[in-house]
Image (tube, rainbow, N blue to C red):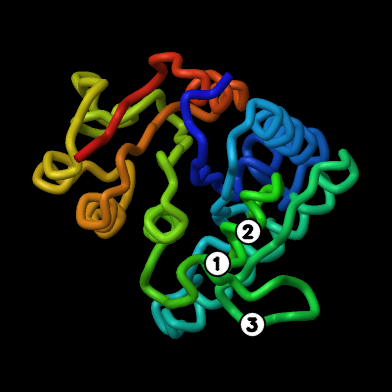
């Protein structure tokens, strides 16, 4: 049983790709992500999934490239990932809908908070693609925005490390894991597990908590939902 009624789960595009990269999608990892979401739904958690696009597009390939165009390409990559996950979920009989911040009604439903809430309340998984719909904002900020709009109990942010550190643990052997930290401290200390804009938005719009944990094991999502003290808790 879950301690959360409604969450926004931020999944990186790399969740769907082979370890080490080299291809956009790995069938086994797509299947594992879909299975995890199905089990999360079985726990009674209303889940909106904000997808990244890093398995397809990593931003400008030269300084000459228009950054607006580059960000628009990234938004399209997140739509592709949502469609991929939709296919895997529907093959498992899990109701879901792809919403996009951009109008592309041949492929997705145009995102509105009202329609996304209705999807969640009817037992479906809302796949929230297209970021915020604007350049210069990351999908982290998109996750915070959707959490505020949909009145989620929490944002779940999976990372490559096991929580929030006071320095980059891949570069600093003395980096300390912070189990409990405030939004204000994350901003003040410049902690980069999420964007400053995402922390600021959560703080201002009353998003209660962000749970940050390792996504190396997708079952960690279910453990956090059940209340296990994995990773870090970021709060007001």
**Percent coordinates x, y for residue 230 in the rendering:** 41, 18
Q: Secondary structure at mark 3?
A: loop
Mark 3, mark 1: which one is toward the viewer?
A: 1
Which residue is at a point 53% across and 77% down the rendered structure image?
A: 72
Which residue is drawn at the image coordinates 63% and 58% (left, top)?
Answer: 118
Name the foreground residue: 22 vs 205.
205
Check contact, mark 3 vs mark 1: CB within 8 A. Answer: no
Q: Which residue is mark 3?
A: 103
Of residues 60 and 50, the one drawn nearer to the viewer in this rendering: 50
Q: CA distance from mark 1 to mark 2?
A: 6 Å
Mark 3 closeness class: few <14, some 14–19, many ≥20 residues within 10 Å: some
Disc 1 target residue: 114
Image quadrant in which the N terminus is located: top right
The image shows residue 128, relative to residue 207, as above or below, that is below
Classify mark 1: residues with Cα within 10 Å, few (<14), some (14-19) or many (20+): few
Among the 4 quarters of the image, the one containing residue 17:
top right
- Residue 182 point in image, percent of width and height: 17, 36
Q: Residues within 10 Å of mark 2 (few under 14, many from 20)?
A: few
Tell me the CA gap for discs 2 and 3. Answer: 19 Å
What residue is drawn where x is 64% and y is 26%?
43
Q: Secondary structure at mark 1?
A: helix
CB under 8 Å between discs 2 and 3: no
* 231 or 46: nearer the viewer: 46
Of badges 2 and 3, the one in the foreground is: 2
Label 1 close to label 2 by CB (< 8 Å): yes
Residue at far left of view: 188
Q: x and y percent of residue 164 in the render? A: 29, 30
- Residue at 22% from the left image edge and 24% from the top image edge: 180
Residue 158 seen in the current view:
yes
Kindly identify which residue carries mark 2. 118
N-terminal of the pair, mark 2 or mark 3, is 3
Q: Quadrant of the C terminus?
A: top left
């Amino acid at each position: 049983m879950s301690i959360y009624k409604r969450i926004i789960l931020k999944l990186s595009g790399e969740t769907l790709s082979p370890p080490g990269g080299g291809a956009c999608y790995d069938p086994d990892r797509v299947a594992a992500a879909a299975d995890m979401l199905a089990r999360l739904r079985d726990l009674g958690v209303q889940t909106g999934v904000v997808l990244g696009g890093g398995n397809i597009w990593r931003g400008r390939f030269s300084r000459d490239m228009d950054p607006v165009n580059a960000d628009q390409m990234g938004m399209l990559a997140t739509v592709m990932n949502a469609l991929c996950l939709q296919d895997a979920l529907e093959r498992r009989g899990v109701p879901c809908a792809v919403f996009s911040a951009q109008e592309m009604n041949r492929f997705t439903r145009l995102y509105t908070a009202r329609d996304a809430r209705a999807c969640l309340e009817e037992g479906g998984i809302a796949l929230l693609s297209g970021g915020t719909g604007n350049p210069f904002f990351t999908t982290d900020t998109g996750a915070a925005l959707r959490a505020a709009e949909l009145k989620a109990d929490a944002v779940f942010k999976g990372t490559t490390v096991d929580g929030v550190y006071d320095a980059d643990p891949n570069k600093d052997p003395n980096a300390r894991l912070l189990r409990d930290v405030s939004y204000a401290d994350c901003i003040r200390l410049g902690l980069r597990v999420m964007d400053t804009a995402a922390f600021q938005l959560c703080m201002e719009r009353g998003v209660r908590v962000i749970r940050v944990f390792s996504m190396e094991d997708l079952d960690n999502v279910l453990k956090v939902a059940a209340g296990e003290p994995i990773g870090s808790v970021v709060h007001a």
